């Protein structure tokens, strides 16, 4: 027997129904915000990803060689491919560009709960604008997507990496020191962070107030903390404009400022945001995004860029943890011809119902009524049509409601009315 | 600048709109026939594909090694993965199983016109029944899918491999000789076929009548040709039952018998069919399928199986060659706030229209009306809403129809009525 590769999944009809529901919901929210869908290949040149994320990413990536001996890699994420696409082919398009995409991504690490080697992501890029309303809309879009799929309890955090960078500067932390601290900030490991900063010769009281600011969601306290730093003040003002738009125009009230959002200081700049589902505990982040500078790295002309990515699996997990009942596959009608000579006429009826868009199956094994009804239940059938010789002579069939078990005899021409 | 890997494609919003249209159409036809969607991973163990297609397939496949040193391969087709899924997890499900799937496949050959290294396929499997009505429904499904996407001119050929096998036996061709002839039959290279058969010591008149039968669509002539072969006669009778169902119950009249359909004699058995779009010339086959025995090969219990696959790219190519106009991406509404202080109110209006499902964009660059209208045209906008301070005082906005250029002043509350 052959086995599925480790860390990957097969999806049953039940799984797919859930996943399609989520995907269609997300797609339609993107659409209402004027986003247009694009797609890039499943693999790219390996150097595209090392250019963005460094050589370190190679060990986390599926890579292989082309016949032309070129190194290729299954994409670990979607932003680099989309930036490559933009630089190669879309630079001349009218700005801003609002692009969204769905795609499977691949990660070569140890499979764990909720982490797979093949996983689905969706995301978007907003290219060519950096106004407050552009960022506010982007954040509102991410928030709306997750609300529209049906999530009740999500937390939106908004920060600004330029403020954090300024604080780092004031604390006289070197780039290497910053690199060491960032993962600790990201994972809220404040004890380790404190120890490391003291090792870097930062005064205890400065460490304590820095760590306090990372955890605070009171914008006035943040303002006081950076009161003497003009650049940070200006960046905070930008954030305030975004907050006003979110509150007053987008009607989103429940967001929090978070200075401690760190998302790859190498290319993220300015506004950043994250959306969590607290119900998921440690693996709670559903969405992350912000403004970044990647286009020049890929050889394009500098232009403001922002975007976000949403993980599918965690979104489904969060929905189900909240008790949301995702739709199950169902069959509108199952047709049972009670005798062989009725099959022809039964198929005709099936075809006429399919033509009006109903999902219709018919017994293809010439079974008895009992077995057929059992099968119909197993595929979640709504109504069964039983076609017997006597009713057929009167141009009638029996319709059985599978929930209630109630049966009625109906003229063939009336079936569509009775079903709808 | 980074480049897209050779033989792969980026899809623009225009491309994706077409592809989504096709995919949704195919998906909904599958659904009306009671099929349920499943999905398998993008890569599988390499041995899954060599087990089905022999070691020869390795040179046509993208393969790479797992960290556990296991050979993996990007799937070149979808049937083997689905059979693996079935054997691993679905064998106990109620029969028949009607499974459909969509997925990208990968082929390591030289890119040529209409052939890509990454390409999309869809297909289905019908597992657990071999009645005439099961095969007729499967063929009708393939035909309906292609008709429902909008194709006008397609040709459906139906054959039966058991008849061809019987003819091979009567001609006393060895398995190796058959293997040599099959590609010639598949490609209708009748001169080469004739020469090869004469080399194999088949009498000239037998060769000629065999080649005639391969090209004939007259079922009576086929019947006369195999009149002395009881097994072939029985298989032809099965085919006739299917033809009767197609004609009388499924209302499909324009199919042809074709004894020369050859689709991997190793595992295809019995009924086979192909659907061509003649407008595409040499690369005209859109769909191929039939009955096959693969489950035992993958370690499962023998059960009748049939299915088909449809290529996306050729289907789109055929549609466009027939002059079918595939839908373009469009934006329902583009909102232009004429002054900065109107942005807030404009966003509110945008949000209220998004809530009722309209696709709405808004100027995010604070441009003038002229530039904004130009941008709105570039994203195929239906209506533009221009929001100025004077109209706003009256709770009004200006709606501009982008086709006619006609403008009218409308109360904010009336916008939804005016747009729909």
Image: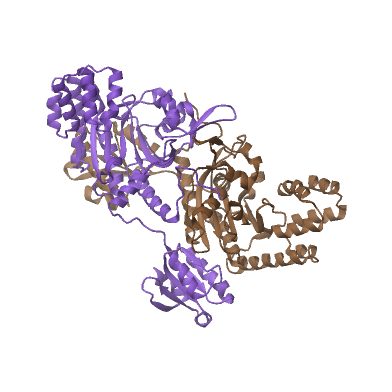
Chain colours: A purple, B brown
- Residue, x 28% and y 45% (percent of image)? A280
Residue B131: % across, % down: 60, 67
Residue B404 in view of the camera: no
Does residue A372 sit above or below A296 in this rendering? below
Q: Quadrant of the C terminus of chain A?
A: bottom left
Residue A38 lies in quadrant: top left
- Residue, x 14% and y 20% (percent of image)? A228
Left/right placement of residue A297 relative to residue A186 reads right
Residue A360: % across, % down: 48, 65
Residue A157: % across, % down: 23, 37
Closest to the observer: A417 or B327? A417
- For the image, the number of numbered tags is 0
Does residue A219 sit above or below B334 in this rendering? above
Residue A399 lies in quadrant: bottom left
Residue A272: % across, % down: 27, 32
Closest to the observer: A112 or A363? A112
Residue A409 in view of the camera: yes
Left/right placement of residue A33 relative to residue A341 reads left
Left/right placement of residue B380 relative to residue A240 reads right
């Amino acid at each position: 027997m052959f086995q599925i590769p480790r860390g990957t999944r097969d999806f049953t009809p039940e799984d797919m129904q859930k996943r399609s529901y989520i995907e269609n919901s997300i797609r339609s929210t993107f659409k209402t915000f004027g986003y247009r869908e694009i797609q890039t290949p499943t693999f790219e040149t390996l150097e595209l990803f090392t250019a963005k994320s460094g050589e370190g990413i190679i060990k986390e990536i599926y890579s292989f060689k082309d016949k032309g001996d070129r190194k290729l890699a299954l994409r670990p994420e979607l932003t680099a491919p989309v930036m490559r696409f933009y630089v190669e082919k879309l630079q001349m398009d009218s700005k801003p560009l609002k692009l969204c995409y769905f795609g499977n991504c691949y990660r070569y690490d140890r499979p764990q709960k909720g982490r797979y080697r093949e996983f689905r992501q969706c995301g978007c890029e907003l290219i060519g604008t950096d106004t407050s309303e552009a960022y506010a809309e982007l954040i509102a879009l991410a928030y709306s997507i997750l609300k529209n799929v049906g999530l009740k309890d999500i937390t939106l955090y908004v920060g600004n990496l330029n403020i954090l960078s300024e604080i780092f500067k004031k604390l006289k932390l070197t780039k290497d020191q910053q690199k060491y601290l960032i993962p600790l900030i990201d994972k809220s490991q404040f004890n380790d962070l404190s120890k490391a900063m003291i090792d870097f010769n930062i005064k205890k009281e400065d460490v304590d107030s820095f760590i306090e600011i990372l955890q605070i969601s009171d914008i006035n306290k943040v303002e006081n903390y950076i009161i003497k730093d003009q650049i940070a003040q200006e960046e905070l003002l930008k954030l305030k404009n975004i907050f006003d738009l979110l509150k007053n125009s987008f009607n989103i009230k429940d967001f929090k400022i978070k200075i401690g959002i760190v998302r790859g200081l190498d290319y993220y700049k300015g506004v950043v945001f994250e959306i969590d589902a607290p119900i998921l505990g440690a693996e709670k982040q559903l969405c992350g995004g912000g403004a970044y500078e990647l286009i020049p790295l890929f050889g394009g002309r500098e232009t403001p860029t922002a975007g976000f990515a949403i993980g599918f699996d965690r979104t489904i997990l969060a929905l189900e943890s909240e008790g949301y009942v995702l739709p199950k596959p169902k069959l509108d009608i199952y047709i049972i011809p009670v005798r062989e000579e009725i099959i022809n006429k039964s198929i005709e009826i099936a075809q006429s119902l399919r033509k009006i868009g109903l999902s219709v199956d018919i017994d293809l094994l010439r079974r008895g009524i009992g077995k057929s009804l059992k099968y119909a239940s197993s595929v979640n059938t709504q109504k069964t049509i039983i076609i017997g010789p006597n009713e057929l002579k009167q141009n009638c069939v029996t319709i059985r409601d599978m929930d209630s078990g109630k049966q009625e005899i109906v003229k063939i021409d009336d079936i569509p009315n009775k079903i709808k």
